[in-house]
Image: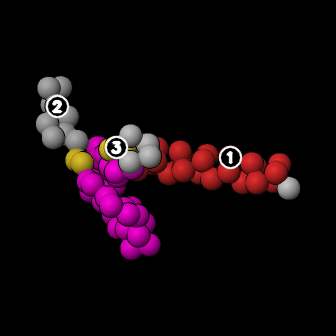
Amino acid sequence: MHHLDGSIETIDVKGIETTDFAIKRKLFEKKFPHKTLLAFSQIDGGWIELDKLKAVRRKRKKAKSLEKMLLR
């Protein structure tokens, strides 16, 4: 995608982050420094940046774990 300021952004859409992609991501980031990785999450409202999705899922998992501990 070309922006009005002349910058270029590359968008890659992921269904699931695989082990192979973790390796390929580093190569992708080197070749396309202005990139956006998107994933779809119905729980989180649709399309979301992959790194933000991972952070939200970690937070949700931690909250769930704390909740289970408190209920014991």
Nearest to the observer: residue 70 or residue 24: 70
Taking the image as drawn, is residue 14 in sight? yes
Q: Which residue is drawn at 82% across and 51% down?
A: 71
Q: Quadrant of the N terminus?
A: top left
Nearest to the observer: residue 43 or residue 17: 43
On the image, numbered disc 3 is attached to which residue? 46
Nearest to the observer: residue 8 or residue 20: 20
Q: Is residue 21 above or below residue 53?
A: below
Q: Which picture quadrant has residue 31? A: bottom left
x, y percent for residue 20: 39, 73
Which residue, as the protein is rendered here, is positioned at the far right? Answer: 72
x, y percent for residue 39: 35, 52
Rate crowding at label 1 as few (under 14), some (14 to 19) or many (20 or more) other CA atoms within 10 Å.
Answer: few
The span shown in magenta is 12-41
In this rendering, position of residue 61 left or right of residue 25: right
Mark 1 → mark 2, Cα distance in angstroms: 39 Å
Q: In this view, does 7 lie above or below 19?
A: above
Q: Residue at x 14, y 26 (%)?
A: 4
Q: Is residue 56 above or below residue 69?
A: above
Amino acid marked by disc 2? His
Taking the image as drawn, is residue 23 in sight? no
Q: Which residue is drawn at 38% across and 48% down?
A: 42
Amino acid marked by disc 1? Ala
| SS for callout 2 | loop
On the image, numbered disc 2 is attached to which residue? 3
Q: Which residue is drawn at 68% across and 51% down?
A: 64
Q: Earlier in the sequence, mark 1 or mark 2?
A: 2
On the image, numbered disc 1 is attached to which residue? 63
x, y percent for residue 51: 45, 48
Q: Is 14 one of the magenta-colored residues?
A: yes
Rate crowding at label 3 as few (under 14), some (14 to 19) or many (20 or more) other CA atoms within 10 Å.
Answer: few
